[in-house]
């Protein structure tokens, strides 16, 4: 059985980073910089904060890469998870105002696919940044990352009802914004 060339390169990259080899660390940084910066940007309001989260997350990657287990997740997925958790830690440090809200499922807003058809990625990202930080975080975790409300509640240290409310509120605000093409 043959192993793809990039898998060998990835394994060597991991081993190099685990040995504190600067060239390997630089290569990993360059390989994951853009996709992880985009992820961090979804959770922050500006590029400076996104870069701060990215660098803090990559530092965690370099510090814990010896513990990486390829049988549990691919390297991209492992780094992605560290970045999401670093972004959440960043939001927590900013002491987001957390208010527990009782959520009721009636009239749950939804974003219709046809609403997004003529929108660019930049425009959608712009609208996401207009959301309040907690609502944006819940929206990202639920819609983009695929977390369940129970997991989101644990990560953000809120109750499940509050997570559901923030998702509902984010959808409502985004729907209004997409339909009117205005800022909140």
Image (tube, grey):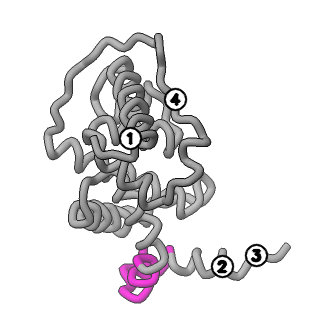
The image quadrant that residue 93 belongs to is top left
Element marked by disc 4: loop
Q: What residue appears at the point 36 percent right and 49 percent down from the top-left corner? A: 127
Q: Earlier in the sequence, mark 3 or mark 1?
A: 3
Which quadrant of the figure contains the N terminus? bottom right
Callout 4 crowding tier (Cα within 10 Å): few <14, some 14–19, many ≥20: few
150 or 2, nearer to the observer: 150
Which quadrant of the figure contains the C terminus? top left
Q: Nearer the viewer, mark 3 or mark 2?
A: 2
Q: Earlier in the sequence, mark 4 or mark 1?
A: 4
Task: Estimate the spatial distance between the alpha carbons at disc 4 and disc 1, rounded to whole Å.
Answer: 13 Å
58 or 172, nearer to the observer: 172
Q: What residue appears at the point 44 percent right and 52 percent down from the top-left corner? A: 124
Element marked by disc 3: loop
Q: Which residue is mark 4?
A: 110
Mark 1 and mark 2 in contact (Cβ < 8 Å)? no
Q: What residue appears at the point 48 percent right and 59 percent down from the top-left corner? A: 121
Residue 123 in picture, x, y percent from top left: 42, 57
Q: Which residue is mark 3?
A: 3
Q: Earlier in the sequence, mark 2 or mark 1?
A: 2
Q: Nearer the viewer, mark 4 or mark 1?
A: 1
Residue range highlighted in magenta: 14-29
Give the main secondary structure of the magenta stretch.
helix
Q: In this rendering, is residue 145 above or below 76? A: above
């Amino acid at each position: 059985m043959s192993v793809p060339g990039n898998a060998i390169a990835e394994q060597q990259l991991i081993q190099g980073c685990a040995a504190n080899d600067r060239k390997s660390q630089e290569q990993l940084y360059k390989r994951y910089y853009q996709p992880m910066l985009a992820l961090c940007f979804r959770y922050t309001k500006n590029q400076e904060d996104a870069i701060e989260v990215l660098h803090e997350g990559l530092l965690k990657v370099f510090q814990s890469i010896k513990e990486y287990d390829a049988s549990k997740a691919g390297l991209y997925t492992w780094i992605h998870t560290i970045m999401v958790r670093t972004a959440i830690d960043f939001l927590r440090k900013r002491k987001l105002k957390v208010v527990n809200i009782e959520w009721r499922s009636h009239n749950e807003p939804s974003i219709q696919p046809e609403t997004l058809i003529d929108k660019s990625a930049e425009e959608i990202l712009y609208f996401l940044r207009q959301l309040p930080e907690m609502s944006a975080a819940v929206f990202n975790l639920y819609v983009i990352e695929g977390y369940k409300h129970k997991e989101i509640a644990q990560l953000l240290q809120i109750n499940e009802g509050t997570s559901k409310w923030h998702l509902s509120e984010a959808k409502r605000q985004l729907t209004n914004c997409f339909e009117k093409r205005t800022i909140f």
